[in-house]
Structures are given as structure tokens and as C-alpha cells.
Image (cartoon, helix red, strand yellow):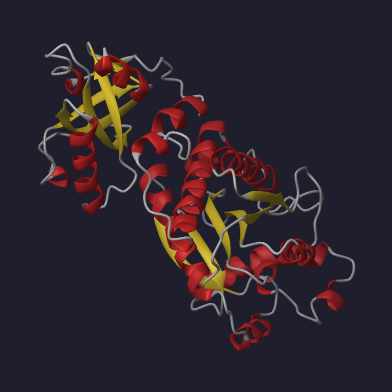
Amino acid sequence: MAQKVQRVVIDAGHGGHDPGAVGKFSKEKDITLSIALKTGNLIKEHLKDVEVIYTRKTDVFVELHRRARIANEAKADLFISIHCNANKSTSPYGSETYVMGLHRSDANLAVAQLENASILLEDDYHVQYEGFDPRSPEGYIFFSMLQNAFLDQGLDFASRVQGHFRNHVKLYDRGVKQAGFLVLYKTTMPSVLIEAGFISNANEEKLLASESGQNKIAQAIFRAVKDYKHAVEKIPPPRYDETAAADVSDEQADTSSGNPGGGTASSVTGPATDQASATGLPVFKVQFMISKTEKRLTSPEFKGIKEIGFYFHQGMYKYTSGNENSMEDAMKIKKDLDKKGYRDSFVIAFFNGERISIDEARKLLKN
């Protein structure tokens, strides 16, 4: 495995005279470009030592072989190609992330054929792809002979993408898959192709085409990059005071998404604030889940979690654990939640029934 993740190439699928899949009111090429730029901006802002390179920053056509060459010439440590899925039926929905390999099902082959069809818009595709015909199922036997030296790393990163899509965007998880994508097969680093959702599905097209949906998808991909980088470089989980500069909190996500729920950081209501500041001091809790709908605090999914509460903030129900008078005690709860699978939990603070920043809470404790 590579020892560092210092250069990431982000590839916005399609572009220019290649619209990609077309929905009722949107085009794949526009959605992928927006998500790619948002993802790159998050990486540049929060992972200062990572260089971001785009295969395209505008609505231009870039040949598939040139996208791989951009990554190879840059000696990238990770290649991320962003796409939207489509189907003749409007029923399929959900996200899936692919690594290079031989398709194991007709459905995987269909996705690869759809994305590889872009080469038919290239003038010299017979030469560039050695006579490969993306429409012929027989041609894909070629991919069974490839040895992908970066398969394990690609699978690792792909699983992280799917996990964050599932947990933070609430996209149905269609899994990590393998198929013969031309944009991946000549890359010389861990590479994935993300199908962020179905533009052919009415609900998912709304998500994919919306500013808030694109923000959430970009944040999920960013989190996967951060997690993968930390795993590769064997970076231990940061202390919370370091996390503020290295992560995207759910509050930032809500603010940047243009959530119609609006509100400021102090605009909170709910049981999580009821016990706060009874001692005249700030109270620390660990936020571990957000939901569009209210959940019963006695729900089986909360089994084993201590002192559950929630507050309503910017149109979302945000669930917390603990009611602590010190940051240290809250961090113990966070570690316990990490073990339970809530690895993106983080510490928050309340004072006089209002959510405040950790810095403010520390100042109040000093005073």
C-alpha cells in the first residue's frame, strides 16, 4: 500500500458534447462536475497537505484515455471518477462504487457499457482502445486478463465511500462492485468509479441535481478520502480540538447545504437541551446521529447508548449521548460510540439551553 496520500485526481464524468445520462430536468455531466468541484474544495480546505487535480473544471469533453493519463502523469495516489447511474426502468435507486475488474453480473456489465459508450464520441477510439467495442459483451472478456495491483486499496476506499453514502446521505447501499471501466483500467494507482445515484429515478434525480444533495454527496466522498488517508498513513484519530480544522461537522454540512430549515447555531430545541447548564457550567454531549424524522428514544437501535437525547436544529433531529461536565468525560463516551460503529460522532456543548462552540465552552470553564 502507498505510504502517503498526497495527490488526489477527481474526475467529473462526461462533459461537453457528451451529456452522459439525461434525467427529466438534469444532465449527468453537470451533476458530476458540481460534485467533483465541491469534493475538491473540501479536500483542499480540510486536508492541507493533499493536492487536488481535476480532469476537468468546466463543461468540456475529455477522452477517457486522457483522464487516466492525467492521473498517471501527476503520479496521483488516488483516482476518483464521479458519475450518475441510469436505467431504462425508473425503479432502481441507490449508490454503488466500482473498482476495475471483470463484471460478475449482467447489471454490472450494463453499467460499464453505459459509461464506456463515451469513447464512441472520440475520433480515434479504435486506435486508442485497440479495437475495443464498448457495445460488445464479448469484448469485456479482455478485462479478465488484467492484474490490478491496486485492487485491495481500491476496494478499501470504495467501501468507505459506500459507508458514508449510507450513513450520511442516506442513500441505499447497492454495494462495492467490479466491472470493466475504460477510465480505470490504465490508471496506475488505487482507482474507483462512483455511481452516486440514479438520475433515472425521480427522487434521486432531485437529490443529485440539488445544491444540498450535491453538498452531502461531496461531504461523504471527502470523509472517505480523509478516512482512507488516515488508514494508509496510520494516522491515529485526532483529539477533538484538532478535529475542528480537519473534518466537516454536521453543522457545517447543514449550513453549506442551504437547508430551508435555516437557523443559527443556537437555534435548537428538544430534550438534549433540557438538562443543560443546571450547574451554571457548559454541558458536553456527543452527537452521533442525524435524522429527517423524529425517532423514539426507546428505539432498539439506541440499545446500550447512555443518556440519549436529541435537539432539533436546522430542520434535522440530532441525537446525542451523555450529559457531561468535562470534555474528557465526553471523549470517553465518544470512544464507546466509536466501538459501536458511530465513528463520525463528535463532541458538542450546550450552555443555558443553547448549543455553543467547544472554544466558548472552554472559555466558560476557565472563567
Above or below residue 268? Residue 53 is below
User: Depth check: 285 or 281 in front?
Assistant: 281
User: Depth check: 348 or 213 in front?
Assistant: 348
Above or below residue 70? Residue 264 is above
Q: Residue at x 43, y 62 (%)?
A: 159
Side of 230 relative to 296 (left or right): right
Above or below residue 303? Residue 112 is below
| Residue 268: quadrant of the picture | top left
User: Depth check: 335 or 314 in front?
Assistant: 335
Q: Position of residue 145 (x, y in %)?
A: 62, 89
Q: Residue at x 28, y 22 (%)?
A: 312
Q: Position of residue 327 (x, y in %)?
A: 24, 31
| Residue 181: quadrant of the picture | bottom right
Seen from this angle, which residue lies furthest right?
A: 123
Q: Position of residue 101 (x, y in %)?
A: 56, 77
Seen from this angle, which residue lies furthest bottom?
A: 145
Side of 262 relative to 344 (left or right): right
Above or below residue 169? Residue 7 is below
User: How many callouts does the rendering have?
Assistant: 0
Point out the image quarter for the C terminus.
Answer: top left
Residue 22 seen in this snapshot = no
Residue 148 seen in this snapshot = yes
Q: Position of residue 186 (x, y in %)?
A: 70, 73
Q: Residue at x 77, y 42 (%)?
A: 58
